[in-house]
Image (cartoon, rainbow, N blue to C red):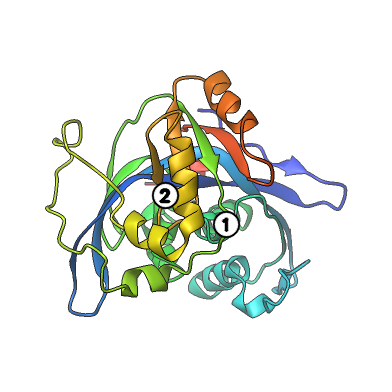
């Protein structure tokens, strides 16, 4: 794969993609003594993405342009990612950040985590830091459990609390993704007493024959009936499943035409998009190791 070349806008910013992911399944297999849940999942990269815009300078300042409404710059994940990298390395360069937000917030597709990972990967290149991938992944874990996956940059069988990854090949396909217009707070799902927390573990070798599901789906559907309604609608065209803790749901198709045909039939005021499977992150070459 050729090295990624960023887009440039009229203001001198370089644009870098922050792709989404889908959980092809998500099992909760236990709980640690500190309260964190132990998971197993397959994370699939898809080509739907946000765009992170960066303009580096010699000021040493981290500046967030056009911040999200109600989110102070210092609470913004892309600002925190840049500051964390700067403090970790002692880099004296600065950067101005902007974000073209396309991925649904609270949708279970990893948008915020992917944005943060893209900042770490892009600044690793732009600031000429040359940190190895393992070091960037460790930094990313301080920002969120899904951030290391996007730095890892390949489809993976994911275990632990999200930090143990085994690369896998998932094949070419297209997805129809529906976004029910509800925001699902992940902690509310994991706190629910009815959440299944004892699904038997599976192995990478057993993936092909294992019976899988999303253990969070039943709780999310009960808390947010629109998710259940979306799954039932999509099930008419192909087996549908929720990703992450929701609210997005998806189904797999063999071609772009098949996926687009389903999206074209969405009821009025429903939201959805098509996306293709990706084998690796566009910025895979921005970290070594």
Where does the image place residue 23, in percent across and percent down from the top left? Answer: 38, 47
Locate residue 169: give its quadrant.
top left
Residue 222 appears left or right of 128: left
Q: Disc 2 marks which residue?
A: 243
Residue 176 appears left or right of 189: right
* Element assignment for label 2: loop
Q: Residue at x 14, y 36 (%)?
A: 206
* Element assignment for label 1: helix
The residue sitting at the right extreme is 10
Circle 1 packing at 10 Å, graded few (<14), some (14-19), many (20+), is many
Q: Residue at x 19, y 73 (%)?
A: 32
Near-viewer residue (70 or 143)? 70
Where does the image place residue 72, in percent across and percent down from the top left? Answer: 68, 79
Near-viewer residue (247 or 34)? 247
Where does the image place residue 280, in percent across and percent down from the top left? Answer: 45, 36
Circle 2 packing at 10 Å, graded few (<14), some (14-19), many (20+), is many
**Distance in Å between CA atoms under marks 1 and 2:** 18 Å
Q: Residue at x 77, y 52 (%)?
A: 13
Near-viewer residue (10 or 274)? 274
| Residue 282 appears in the picture as rendered | no
Residue 157 disc label? none
Q: Disc 1 marks which residue?
A: 115
Locate residue 272: give its quadrant.
top right
On screen, 10 above or below 256? below
| Residue 289 appears in the picture as rendered | yes
Residue 209 appears left or right of 191: left
- Numbered disc in front, either 1 or 2: 2
**Number of marks in picture:** 2
Near-viewer residue (82 or 98)? 98
């Amino acid at each position: 794969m050729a090295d990624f070349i960023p887009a440039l806008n009229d203001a001198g910013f370089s644009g870098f993609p922050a792709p989404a992911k889908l959980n092809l399944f998500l099992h909760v297999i236990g709980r640690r003594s500190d309260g964190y849940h132990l998971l197993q999942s397959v994370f699939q990269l898809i080509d739907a993405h946000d765009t992170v815009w960066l303009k580096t300078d010699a000021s040493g300042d981290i500046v967030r342009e056009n911040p999200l409404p109600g989110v102070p710059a210092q609470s913004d994940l892309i600002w925190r990612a840049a500051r964390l990298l700067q403090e970790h390395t002692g880099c004296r360069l600065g950067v101005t950040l902007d974000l073209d937000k396309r991925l649904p917030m609270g949708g279970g597709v990893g948008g915020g985590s992917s944005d943060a990972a893209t900042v770490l990967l892009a600044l690793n290149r732009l600031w000429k830091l040359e940190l190895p991938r393992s070091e960037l992944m460790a930094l990313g874990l301080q920002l969120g459990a899904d951030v290391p996956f996007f730095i890892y940059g390949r489809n993976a069988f994911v275990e632990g609390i999200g930090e143990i990854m085994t690369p896998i090949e998932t094949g070419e396909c297209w997805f129809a993704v529906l976004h029910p217009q509800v925001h699902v707070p992940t902690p509310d799902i994991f706190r629910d007493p009815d959440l299944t927390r004892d699904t038997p573990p599976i192995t990478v070798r057993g993936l092909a024959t294992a019976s899988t599901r999303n253990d969070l789906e039943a709780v999310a559907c009960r808390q947010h009936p629109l998710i259940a309604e979306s799954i039932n609608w999509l099930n008419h065209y192909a087996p549908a499943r929720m990703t992450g803790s929701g609210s997005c749901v998806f189904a797999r198709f063999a071609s772009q035409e098949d996926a687009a045909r389903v999206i074209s039939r969405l009821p009025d005021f429903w939201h959805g998009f098509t996306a293709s499977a990706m084998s690796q992150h566009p910025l895979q070459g921005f970290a070594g190791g």
